[in-house]
Amino acid sequence: MNESLYKNAEEAKRHAAAIDRIAASMQVRPEEVEPLYERMLAKMQKKARIKTFLAIFTARRVEQLLRRLNAPHRRRSYGGASMINAQ
Protein backbone atom coordinates (compact mmCIF):
# COMPACT_ATOMS: atom_id res chain seq x y z
CA MET A 1 0.00 0.00 0.00
CA ASN A 2 1.30 3.40 -0.99
CA GLU A 3 1.38 5.22 2.36
CA SER A 4 2.03 8.63 0.78
CA LEU A 5 -1.54 8.67 -0.61
CA TYR A 6 -3.09 8.67 2.86
CA LYS A 7 -3.09 11.37 5.53
CA ASN A 8 -3.32 8.95 8.44
CA ALA A 9 -3.91 5.33 9.43
CA GLU A 10 -7.68 5.79 9.59
CA GLU A 11 -7.82 7.03 6.01
CA ALA A 12 -5.58 4.16 4.89
CA LYS A 13 -7.96 1.68 6.57
CA ARG A 14 -10.97 3.26 4.84
CA HIS A 15 -9.34 2.90 1.44
CA ALA A 16 -8.11 -0.64 2.21
CA ALA A 17 -11.70 -1.59 3.07
CA ALA A 18 -12.87 -0.13 -0.26
CA ILE A 19 -10.24 -2.19 -2.09
CA ASP A 20 -11.40 -5.34 -0.27
CA ARG A 21 -15.06 -4.63 -1.14
CA ILE A 22 -14.21 -4.14 -4.81
CA ALA A 23 -12.15 -7.33 -4.88
CA ALA A 24 -14.97 -9.33 -3.29
CA SER A 25 -17.66 -7.94 -5.57
CA MET A 26 -15.56 -8.41 -8.72
CA GLN A 27 -14.24 -11.81 -7.58
CA VAL A 28 -10.58 -10.87 -7.91
CA ARG A 29 -7.73 -10.69 -5.43
CA PRO A 30 -7.20 -7.41 -3.52
CA GLU A 31 -3.61 -7.41 -4.85
CA GLU A 32 -5.02 -7.02 -8.36
CA VAL A 33 -7.33 -4.15 -7.36
CA GLU A 34 -4.87 -2.18 -5.22
CA PRO A 35 -2.63 -0.75 -7.98
CA LEU A 36 -5.64 0.29 -10.08
CA TYR A 37 -7.31 1.84 -7.05
CA GLU A 38 -4.23 3.73 -5.94
CA ARG A 39 -3.55 5.13 -9.42
CA MET A 40 -7.16 6.27 -9.70
CA LEU A 41 -7.06 7.73 -6.18
CA ALA A 42 -3.87 9.68 -6.92
CA LYS A 43 -5.41 11.08 -10.07
CA MET A 44 -8.63 12.05 -8.31
CA GLN A 45 -6.82 13.57 -5.30
CA LYS A 46 -5.11 16.07 -7.58
CA LYS A 47 -8.42 17.35 -8.93
CA ALA A 48 -10.64 17.10 -5.84
CA ARG A 49 -11.43 20.19 -3.85
CA ILE A 50 -13.49 18.27 -1.30
CA LYS A 51 -11.90 14.96 -0.39
CA THR A 52 -14.58 13.54 1.91
CA PHE A 53 -16.06 11.15 -0.65
CA LEU A 54 -12.92 10.17 -2.55
CA ALA A 55 -13.08 6.55 -1.39
CA ILE A 56 -16.62 6.21 -2.76
CA PHE A 57 -15.91 7.91 -6.08
CA THR A 58 -12.62 6.08 -6.56
CA ALA A 59 -14.26 2.73 -5.81
CA ARG A 60 -16.98 3.42 -8.39
CA ARG A 61 -14.46 4.33 -11.07
CA VAL A 62 -12.32 1.26 -10.39
CA GLU A 63 -15.36 -1.04 -10.46
CA GLN A 64 -16.42 0.47 -13.79
CA LEU A 65 -12.93 -0.02 -15.17
CA LEU A 66 -12.77 -3.63 -14.01
CA ARG A 67 -16.20 -4.35 -15.49
CA ARG A 68 -15.09 -2.95 -18.84
CA LEU A 69 -11.87 -4.97 -18.75
CA ASN A 70 -13.69 -8.18 -17.81
CA ALA A 71 -16.75 -7.71 -20.06
CA PRO A 72 -17.18 -10.44 -22.65
CA HIS A 73 -16.71 -9.25 -26.19
CA ARG A 74 -20.08 -8.51 -27.70
CA ARG A 75 -21.06 -8.27 -31.31
CA ARG A 76 -22.19 -4.87 -32.42
CA SER A 77 -25.70 -4.87 -33.70
CA TYR A 78 -27.38 -2.38 -35.93
CA GLY A 79 -31.11 -2.57 -36.37
CA GLY A 80 -31.31 -5.96 -34.70
CA ALA A 81 -28.82 -7.70 -37.01
CA SER A 82 -25.33 -8.53 -35.84
CA MET A 83 -22.34 -7.37 -37.86
CA ILE A 84 -21.69 -10.96 -38.87
CA ASN A 85 -25.19 -11.35 -40.35
CA ALA A 86 -24.95 -7.98 -42.11
CA GLN A 87 -22.17 -9.16 -44.46
Image: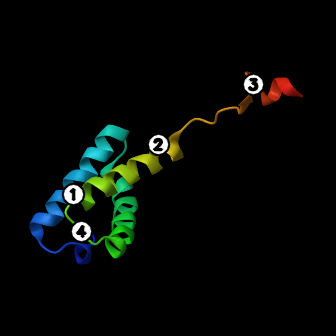
Q: What residue type is labelled 4?
A: Ile
Q: Give the answer, above or below, for where 7 lies relative to 65.
A: below
Q: Distance between the residues labelled 2 and 4?
A: 27 Å
The residue singled out by tag 2 in the image is 67
Q: Position of residue 70 (x, y in %)?
A: 51, 42
Q: How far apart are marks 3 and 2 (CA)?
A: 26 Å
Disc nearest the viewer among 2 and 4: 4
Label 1 or label 4, whichever lies nearer to me, is 4
- Read off the residue under disc 4: 50
Is disc 2 placed on a helix, strand or loop? helix
Q: Mark 1 points at which residue?
A: 16
**Front position among marks 1 and 3:** 3
Mark 1 secondary-structure assignment: helix
Q: Distance between the residues labelled 2 and 1?
A: 20 Å
Number of other residues with Cα within 10 Å of mark 3, as a class: few under 14, some 14 to 19, many 20 or more:
few
Q: Which residue is drawn at 72% across and 29% down?
A: 77
Q: Where is residue 20 in the image (x, y as percent from the top left)?
A: 25, 49
From the viewer's perspective, is 31 left or right of 17? Answer: right
Which of the two labelled residues, at mark 1 and mark 3, occupies the earlier sequence position?
1
* Residue 82 drawn at (x, y percent): 76, 26
Viewer-side label of 2, 1: 2
Q: Residues within 10 Å of mark 2 (few under 14, many from 20)?
A: few
Dot 3 corresponds to which residue?
79
Which of discs 3 and 2 lies nearer the camera? The answer is: 3
* Badge 2 vs badge 1, beta-carbon distance below 8 Å: no
Horizontal side, residue 77 vs residue 58: left or right: right
Q: Earlier in the sequence, mark 3 or mark 2?
A: 2
- Image coordinates of residue 34 in percent, x first then y, are 33, 59
The quadrant holding residue 27 is: top left
- Amino acid on which the number 3 mark rests in the picture: Gly
Residue type (three-letter) at the residue carrying disc 1? Ala
User: Image point 39% across, 67% down: which residue?
Assistant: 39
